[in-house]
């Protein structure tokens, strides 16, 4: 009983710490006036299409450095995370749903920002993040992503989608979803305090 209470207090402390670290607001989208002539709208669309085909649908994570700048940041669910965190999350997602297929809809380009609506379909047949045993339940989620491109690589991403809807479809309770979200906050705070060295 005493251990449980100590664990709860430790978790609460880490959540408060994570909230304090997370107070920094993400920067608004910005366009780069110095965009290189090589970044034509068609080339930028092809680059973003590779995100869906190479990474999401085929799990070719060796292509990350060809697609993204090393200092790329991703804005999602009110958080700003480094590229490596987002790639790790993508790998976990593919582990939980190995048959996932992400279908990009129409793409539009304004300046050096590519906007795409997308739909993801699959089934929860694998396990990842220790969240829960595979349920075999099918899911379908939709969202919109914006990619800022500079010098032929993606340097910033904004993702908008309802993760809670995904959790609902595969049977994750609202409490477990909340705890998962808070645990992610703690991990991000710890990564900021104790950054990983070069791999």
Image (cartoon, rainbow, N blue to C red):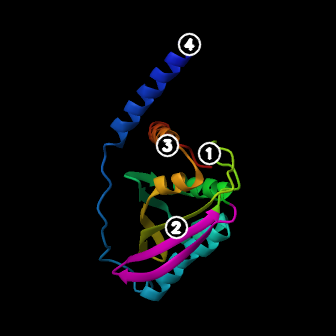
Q: Could you tell which of marks 2 and 1 lies nearer the N-terminus?
A: 2
Image quarter of residue 132: top right
Q: Which residue is mark 2?
A: 68
Q: Nearer the viewer, residue 176 or 34?
A: 176
- Which residue: 48% across, 23% down? 8
- Which residue: 45% across, 74% down? 117
Which residues are the magenta region?
98-122
Q: Nearer the viewer, mark 4 or mark 1?
A: 4
Disc on res. 7? none
Q: Nearer the viewer, residue 182 or 53?
A: 182
Q: Could you tell which of marks 3 and 2 lies nearer the N-terminus?
A: 2
Q: Tell me, yes or no, whether the highlighted magenta stretch contains residue 104.
A: yes
Tell me the CA gap for discs 4 and 1: 26 Å
Image quarter of residue 22: top left
Disc on res. 1? 4
Q: Which residue is mark 3?
A: 184
Callout 4: 10 Å neighbours few (<14), some, many (20+)? few
Tell me the CA gap for discs 2 and 1: 24 Å
Q: Which residue is mark 1?
A: 129
Q: Secondary structure at mark 3?
A: helix
Q: Could you tell which of marks 4 and 3 lies nearer the N-terminus?
A: 4
């Amino acid at each position: 009983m005493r251990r449980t209470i100590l664990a709860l207090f430790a978790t609460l402390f880490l959540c408060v710490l994570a909230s304090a670290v997370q107070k920094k607001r993400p920067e608004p989208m910005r366009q780069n006036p110095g965009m290189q002539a090589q970044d034509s709208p068609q080339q930028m669309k092809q680059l973003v299409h590779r995100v869906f085909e190479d990474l999401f649908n085929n799990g070719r994570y060796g292509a990350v450095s060809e697609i993204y700048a090393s200092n790329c940041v991703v804005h999602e669910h009110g958080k700003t995370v480094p590229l490596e965190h987002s790639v790790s999350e993508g790998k976990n997602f593919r582990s939980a749903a190995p048959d996932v297929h992400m279908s990009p809809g129409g793409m539009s380009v304004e300046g050096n920002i590519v906007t795409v609506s997308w739909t993801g379909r699959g089934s929860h047949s694998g396990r990842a993040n220790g969240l829960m045993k595979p349920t075999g339940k099918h899911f379908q989620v939709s969202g919109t992503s914006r990619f800022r491109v500079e010098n032929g690589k993606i340097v910033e991403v904004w993702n908008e989608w309802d993760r809670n809807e995904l959790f609902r479809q595969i049977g994750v309770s609202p409490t477990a979803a909340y705890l998962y979200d808070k645990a992610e906050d703690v991990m991000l705070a710890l990564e900021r305090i104790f950054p990983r060295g070069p791999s």
